[in-house]
Image (tube, coloured by chain):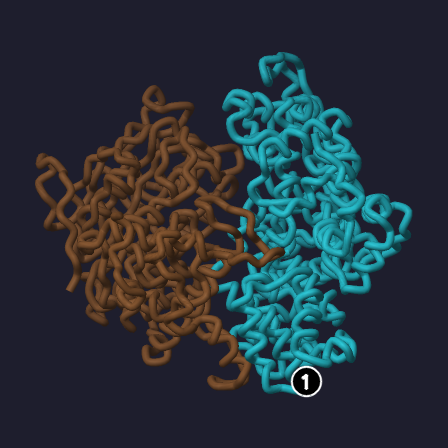
């Protein structure tokens, strides 16, 4: 019996941070958590959080397919100017990074970060046989699947399943209405919120009878928990014998829609209490530009400042699908991105948290090298990624792809760095976990991204995980 | 094969299921009336809606605006930047106001109109042929597309596909109007195969590139108010699609796509997901695809077979679907026998809950299923439930500001109110006589089924010391049941 490491329910409650709030909802996920915790009883892989230490990864999705060539401009490359007679960015307008590459003129914030040693560009990131559908390619980036495989869970979801079993639901926070597919996991993890003020059950008052009844759904006595030592596990207890209970159809992973809703209700209540405790004592910080992305990053900084024990924050910015009139729209989006991230990093520095944070941008694909007849570009393939943090080695990573028409595939840039190499680097060197089980058992070469990265020639065996404070 | 539901399984529960799925739910009395029609009568009542008069007038601005181009040109040429900014702003606000009117116009049709199934199908097709105001920016085009979807809602699929493809909204949304034989735009060509008809893996990149040539020439009239074919822009050379070569037109290619065996399968799966369940059993999809294919892509016939099938009423389908925000709102209004909330209240709720009509997140439409639910919008559902049941006398944080911006800060006081629902008429004296009766009536009306015992206990505990039940107690009990996991299912 390797799946019953707990001898008492009280042990179980003590072990899972969710325990205090765990109540009527004991569907299959608890059994899964329970068994996974059993397998990891030494705790070595479970990431303990205190809220004031531990690395944080902030993902910024650039939705729609960001045109890499007009973001990081190869300003000495004749192939670039030949392909883009109308929308190409003039070489005297770019913000120079080195002898061949310069940033879009709106990206002064990123230029500052680069000059201060806090920004790294990975050139030519993609994957084999690129897919040019927004949805499929986004799915590939979110699930880290091979281009011909379909995975239900996301790459961060597998990180949660492997390294965060039993963690607080706020281990991962999406700022926005919908959870990204990257969060999809065997055990649903992570919360979504837009506005911390309305992120709660609103009753007439904190102790009115309605609120008390609502809260009672999330706190039941210890002995209401099923007996995990009875051998039947949670399956024997879930659902009971009541007929006609709603939602017993199984979704993937043996979860019913009702199980899912129970779990999410509980996560909502637990995270609501926690987030409101933080925002009530941490003021909103100023000096951000006025746009949606900035507003969301501002909230992330506030939650970090307040000590929310999160490892992952996820925000997104749309508007990159520039089939027409690209210069007007993409330049404005990139300026928003760059100004917002600069304000965010300044804010983090002022609260002493910049050292804990690494920011990664990604987009489902770059765009066709040749501009189209509408002053835009069509869906393409490889593109650069931006990585920002005080602990990174600033500079340019990955080989710059050739734009020579004979080196293109159907007019698109060939990748030099697989995006899963970037994920592997972040998982291993930043989040300190073994990337292998998260990336389908495949080993991807890591990049010398961090200032304390091993020499790239060194084999990249997984390091033992740290266990926090 | 889909088997017909045995007559003895047509009961209030199965009638409620049909009411919720073919329409948007109903009060216990409405469900009882549907039940009394018998299954065949009930299905035909929903499907043969053309017998029911619907004289809902279109919004008064929903007509071609031949002056639009001239007006836009004039704004571009405005003498000083300040005037230009003001005129731009004016136009922007007018578009937003018309769009809000259109959203509410449709929502009212879904909630209160005489043909719920036609509206449910229209909602299905809107998600299927997802087109967003964010890019189209023209309320008239979106009304036109909505009307196209409604008029063709249960007709022949290939006719619907061609009608939607040649509607101005789609020509703008997927850049068809920008496509020219010198540079065929692939956006529409790709999405039509990937998302509207065949699904990933059932065509090649070459099929897309070749089909894109066939669609060239489709465009808008000079005044940009309707579809017009421009022969000079059309590539009339040979194209090779699905291994066949010919000088195809765009319509030819769309018909060839509909003839692919995968097409009926793809549509059948989408229908099954929307109307029945999230993870369709493959055998059911095969059976429905077969019906669709053999009927020559006749949607009404296919839906009629679906709604009469045993599989539609299986235990894995009933009360197992997570409500979309539109379903959540309208079903609640029926259950509460309350008026639809005002335009700004309704629209802000739908936006916050993740289903802003005419603004799906992308061309794939809404994912549906568990994607409707996040911790954030679950809490929103709980709080909006309070507004629907108890009235929004207590201002909801976040909601007020959003509504003001929606109304462009026009004095909105009357429109920001929801009165408390009249809950006393929902229950009989017998229902209210004791806690057990009340709990049964509450679950029957609001769930068409039962809560899990632990949540029945929460309600029983809440009601325990309250006898006789006062109006405020009834309201709170309703709000509580609406804040339970079972309530999010239909």
Q: Residue at x 60, y 68 (%)?
A: B482
Q: Quadrant of residue B416?
A: bottom right
Pick the residue in front: A195 or A132.
A195
The chain assigned the colour cyan in the figure is: B
Q: Is residue B167 visible?
A: yes
Pick the residue in front: A419 or B296.
B296
Residue A185 at x, y = what percent? 39, 49
Q: Quadrant of the C terminus of chain B?
A: bottom right
Pick the residue in front: A18 or A41.
A41
Residue A265 at x, y = what percent? 47, 64
The chain assigned the colour brown in the figure is: A
Q: Quadrant of the N terminus of chain B?
A: top right
Q: Secondary structure at mark 1?
A: loop
Q: Is residue A212 left or right of residue A465?
A: right
Q: Is residue B227 visible?
A: no
Q: Is residue A416 left or right of residue B412?
A: left
Q: Quadrant of residue B403?
A: bottom right
Q: Residue at x 59, y 86 (%)?
A: B465
Pick the residue in front: A212 or B455.
B455
Residue A238 at x, y = what percent? 47, 56
Q: Residue at x 48, y 35 (%)?
A: A133
For disc 1, the neighbor class at 10 Å (few under 14, some 14 to 19, many from 20) is some
Q: Is residue B39 left or right of residue A271?
A: right
Q: Is residue A134 above or below residue A51?
A: above
Callout 1: residue from which chain?
Answer: B
Provide the residue designation for mark 1: B469
Q: Is residue A41 above or below residue B240?
A: below
Callout count: 1
């Amino acid at each position: 019996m390797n799946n019953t490491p707990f001898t008492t329910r009280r042990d179980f409650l003590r072990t899972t941070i969710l325990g205090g709030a765990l109540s009527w909802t004991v569907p299959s996920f608890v059994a899964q958590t329970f068994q996974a915790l059993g397998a990891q009883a030494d705790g070595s892989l479970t990431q303990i959080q205190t809220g004031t230490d531990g690395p944080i990864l902030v993902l910024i999705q650039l939705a729609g397919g960001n045109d890499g060539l007009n973001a990081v401009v190869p300003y000495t490359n004749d192939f670039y100017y030949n392909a883009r007679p109308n929308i190409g960015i003039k070489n005297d307008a770019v913000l120079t990074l080195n002898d061949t590459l310069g940033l879009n003129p709106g990206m002064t914030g990123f230029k500052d970060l680069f000059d201060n040693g806090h920004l790294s560009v990975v050139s030519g990131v993609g994957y084999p046989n690129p897919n040019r559908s927004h949805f499929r390619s986004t799915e590939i980036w979110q699930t880290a699947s091979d281009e011909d495989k379909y995975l239900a869970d996301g790459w961060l979801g597998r990180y949660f399943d492997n390294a965060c079993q039993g963690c607080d639901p706020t281990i991962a926070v999406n700022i926005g209405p919908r959870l990204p597919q990257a969060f999809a996991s065997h055990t649903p993890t992570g919360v979504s919120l837009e506005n911390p003020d309305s992120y709660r059950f609103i009753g007439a008052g904190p102790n009115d009878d309605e609120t008390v009844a609502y809260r009672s759904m999330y706190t039941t006595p210890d002995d209401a928990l099923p007996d995990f030592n009875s051998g039947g596990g949670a399956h024997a207890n879930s659902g009971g014998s009541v007929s006609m209970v709603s939602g017993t159809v199984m979704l993937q992973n043996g979860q019913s829609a009702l199980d899912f809703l129970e779990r999410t209700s509980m996560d909502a209540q637990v995270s609501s209490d926690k987030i409101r405790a933080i925002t009530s004592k941490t003021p909103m910080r100023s000096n951000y530009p006025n746009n949606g992305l900035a507003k969301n990053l501002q909230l992330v900084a506030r939650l970090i400042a307040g000590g929310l024990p999160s490892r992952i924050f996820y925000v997104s910015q749309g508007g990159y699908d520039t089939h027409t009139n690209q210069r007007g729209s993409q330049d404005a989006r990139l300026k928003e991105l760059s100004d917002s991230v600069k304000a965010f990093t300044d804010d983090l520095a002022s609260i002493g948290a910049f050292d804990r944070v690494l920011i990664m941008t990604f987009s489902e694909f770059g765009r066709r090298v040749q501009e189209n007849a509408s002053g835009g570009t069509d869906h393409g393939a490889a593109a650069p990624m931006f990585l920002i943090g005080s602990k990174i080695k600033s500079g340019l990573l990955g080989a710059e792809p050739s734009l020579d028409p004979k080196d293109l595939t159907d007019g698109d840039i060939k990748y030099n760095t697989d995006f899963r190499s970037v994920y592997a680097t972040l998982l291993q060197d930043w989040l300190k976990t073994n990337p292998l089980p998260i990336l389908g058992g495949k080993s991807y070469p890591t990049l010398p991204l961090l200032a304390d990265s091993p020499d790239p020639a060194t084999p990249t065996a997984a390091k033992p995980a740290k266990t926090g404070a | 094969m889909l088997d017909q539901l045995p007559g003895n399984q047509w009961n209030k529960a199965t009638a409620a299921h049909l009411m919720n799925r073919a329409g948007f739910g109903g009060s216990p009395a409405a469900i009882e009336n549907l039940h009394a029609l018998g299954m065949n009568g009930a299905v035909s009542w929903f499907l043969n809606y053309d017998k029911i008069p619907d004289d809902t007038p279109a919004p008064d601005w929903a007509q071609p605006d031949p002056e639009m181009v001239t007006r836009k040109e004039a704004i571009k040429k405005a003498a000083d930047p300040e005037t230009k900014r003001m005129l731009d702003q004016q136009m922007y606000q007018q578009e937003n106001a018309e769009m809000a009117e259109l959203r509410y116009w449709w929502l009212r049709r879904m909630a209160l109109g005489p043909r719920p199934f036609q509206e449910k199908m229209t909602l299905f097709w809107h998600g299927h042929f997802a087109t967003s105001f964010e890019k189209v920016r023209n309320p008239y085009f979106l009304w036109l597309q909505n009307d196209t979807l409604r008029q063709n809602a249960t007709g022949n699929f290939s006719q619907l596909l061609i009608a939607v493809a040649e509607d101005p909204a789609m020509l703008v949304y997927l850049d068809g109007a920008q496509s020219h034989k010198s540079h065929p735009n692939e956006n529409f060509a790709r999405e039509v195969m990937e998302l509207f008809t065949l699904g990933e893996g059932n065509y090649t990149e070459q099929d897309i590139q070749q089909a894109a040539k066939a669609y060239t020439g489709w465009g808008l009239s000079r005044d940009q108010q309707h579809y017009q074919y421009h022969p000079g822009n059309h590539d009339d050379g040979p194209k090779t699609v699905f291994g066949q070569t010919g000088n195809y037109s765009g319509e030819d290619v769309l018909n060839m796509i509909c003839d692919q065996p995968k097409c009926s399968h793809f549509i059948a799966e989408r229908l099954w997901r929307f109307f029945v369940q999230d993870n369709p059993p493959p055998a059911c999809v095969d059976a429905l695809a077969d019906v669709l294919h053999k009927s020559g892509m006749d949607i009404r016939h296919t839906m009629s077979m679906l709604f009469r099938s045993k599989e539609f009423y299986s235990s894995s389908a009933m009360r197992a679907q997570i409500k979309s925000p539109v379903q959540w709102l309208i079903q609640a209004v029926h259950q509460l026998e309350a008026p639809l909330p005002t335009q700004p209240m309704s629209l802000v709720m739908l936006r916050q809950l993740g289903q802003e009509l005419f603004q799906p997140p992308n061309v794939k439409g809404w994912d549906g299923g568990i994607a409707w639910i996040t911790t954030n919008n679950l809490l929103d559902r709980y709080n909006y439930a309070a507004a629907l049941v108890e009235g929004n006398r207590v201002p909801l944080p976040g909601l007020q500001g959003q509504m003001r911006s929606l109304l462009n800060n026009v004095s909105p006081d009357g429109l920001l109110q929801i009165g408390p629902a009249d809950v006393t008429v929902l229950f009989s004296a017998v229902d209210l006589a004791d806690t057990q009766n009340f709990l049964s009536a509450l679950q029957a009306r609001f769930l068409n089924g039962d809560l899990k015992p632990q949540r029945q206990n929460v309600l029983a505990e809440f009601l325990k010391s309250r006898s006789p039940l006062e109006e405020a107690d009834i309201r709170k009990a309703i709000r509580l049941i609406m804040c339970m996991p079972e309530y999010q299912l239909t």
